[in-house]
Amino acid sequence: MTAFVLVSGPFTGGWLWQEVAARLGESGAEVYPATLTGMGDPRRPAGPGTDLETHIEDLVRLIDEIDAPEVVIVGHDYGIHPVLGAADRRPERIARIVYLDAGMPQDGDAAVALVPDQTIREGLSHQGGQSESDWRIPAPQHDEWQRWGSTDGIPAEALARMDRLAVPQPAGTFTQPLRLSGAGSGLPTTGVLCTANGSSIEMVEFLVTSGPPQFRWLADPRVTFFELATGHWPMLSSPDELAGVLLRAAAGEGHRVTTAPGEQPAHLRTFLLDVEERPRERVGEVDLYLPDPPGAPDAERPRPAVVFVHGGPVAPDERPTPRDWPGYVGYCRYVASLGAIGVMLDHRLHGLADYARAAEDVAAAVERVRADPRVDGDRVALWYFSGGGLLSADPLAEPPPWLRCVAMTYPVLAPLPGWGMVDARFRPVQAVSRAGRLPVVLTRVGLENAAIAATVGEFLSTAEDCKADVEVVDVPLGHHGFETIDHTEEARGAVERAVRAVLGHLMG
């Protein structure tokens, strides 16, 4: 017999699962809808010291009381944090972990980082959760639930029940980091993705094949996925469908993302152009690729520079780091072979809330490069890739006089669905209206992820309306990351056209 432990998101308790629990029970399963400390059970009130550890201990005690041989533990939204903590303590009892429209927190992550609404997230980040006045987060009411996730499909009476039964959330549950030993890292997992809230199997497949390398684990055969065409609270909007999906997940069913056995990750494959090595100088987090070796007659002559800004987010422990990925190295060498200085840096875009920090890293690198006597500080281009495209908002909104061109390749130009934690400042689709006559070279791939392609379309529409100077280099049969995936004449020609367009603005 299978036992389901159901853990809801913030402000709610076991009552949220009433309809789902009934349907699971009808199938013969044991069902334990958890109400964690302070979340509505008068026997376990919260206090200023209630934190994530309190909720993990609640679940560990519950798991220890269950006799069923197989426990499937389901974490919705914030609930995935105590679920992962409890599974780490009792891995031998857990048959499967289900991420129900939840993030993928790692060791050291606090739940506050995944709160979708920026205003709420910033307020929580400043809440210590220690004093008598600030240790609780007021429960949403009415339209405020939308700030925590899509309410699509929830009947009016169910929304009214949420308003009536929701309770304040102890702030410490959001601000205390999750601590994991790794004991539960090999457990089978299932992701249940709610498409009206912005997640989908298509996006997962894109992340595995073309996204940051930390998502490769999603192709593990022990990982399965389901989609529900509803909002963030499927236990209220689609209880029958959710119960069916949970039963199938417990049986090991679901969509599996696959990669070819032994296939090298896309970001580590060779660059599509055969470019000779150029002299490289590494200073801190910045690499300079120079047109001439030291001591050559023109080695000290100031040259224009192209600063390449990698995409992401990329996990902080990823090795090699982006500045050593073949694609970026290839671009830098190619630029240097044509007489400019190629610049590559590692920036700290490790999570969706890190864009401001990454922008600081890029700005500091640019200033360091412009101060180098071998660089013509008045002739610099910035070139952004993939998720790094959001970082182009600052120079587009206020182009500095030394910036001669902005380039973008398969860029993300507005936060994608589910990226609510990205600072509102990083919206290139809006910033381009202030770019004036700053030249923009945008490389667009025809086989792009639909959500990313939509941001590019919106950007180009705004650019056309404001008569921005945008040149589009199309790669009709190109994929996201095509420089190491599509070794075709079309792809090679696109890289050559884009590079020469950028250098034309620098050297003309």
Image (cartoon, helix red, strand yellow):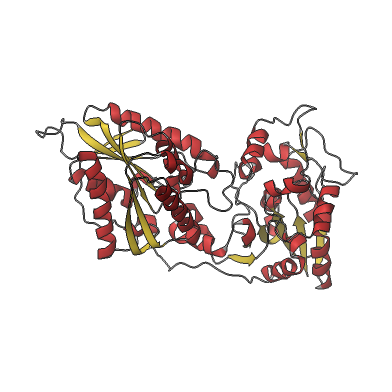
Expressed as whole percent of the image width and height from the top left, the position of residue 100 reads 67, 58
Residue 386 appearing in the image: no
Expressed as whole percent of the image width and height from the top left, the position of residue 352 reads 53, 44
Q: Residue furthest right?
A: 43
- Residue drawn where x is 75% and y is 54% of the image: 7
Q: Nearer the viewer, residue 54 or 182?
A: 54
Q: Nearer the viewer, residue 197 or 281?
A: 197
Q: Nearer the viewer, residue 438 or 363?
A: 438
Is the residue 440 above or below the residue 371 in the image?
below
Residue 203 appearing in the image: yes
Q: Nearer the viewer, residue 167 or 3?
A: 167
For residue 498, side relative to residue 161 (left or right): left
For residue 148, side relative to residue 496 (left or right): right
Is the residue 400 above or below the residue 196 in the image?
above
Is the residue 497 above or below the residue 131 in the image?
below
- Residue drawn where x is 52% and y is 66% of the image: 257
Tell me the quarter of the picture where residue 304 sits: top left
Expressed as whole percent of the image width and height from the top left, the position of residue 57 reads 76, 45
- Residue drawn where x is 60% and y is 66% of the image: 224
For residue 5, side relative to residue 221 (left or right): right
Expressed as whole percent of the image width and height from the top left, the position of residue 25 reads 83, 68
Q: Quadrant of the N terminus?
A: bottom right
Is the residue 100 above or below the residue 353 in the image?
below
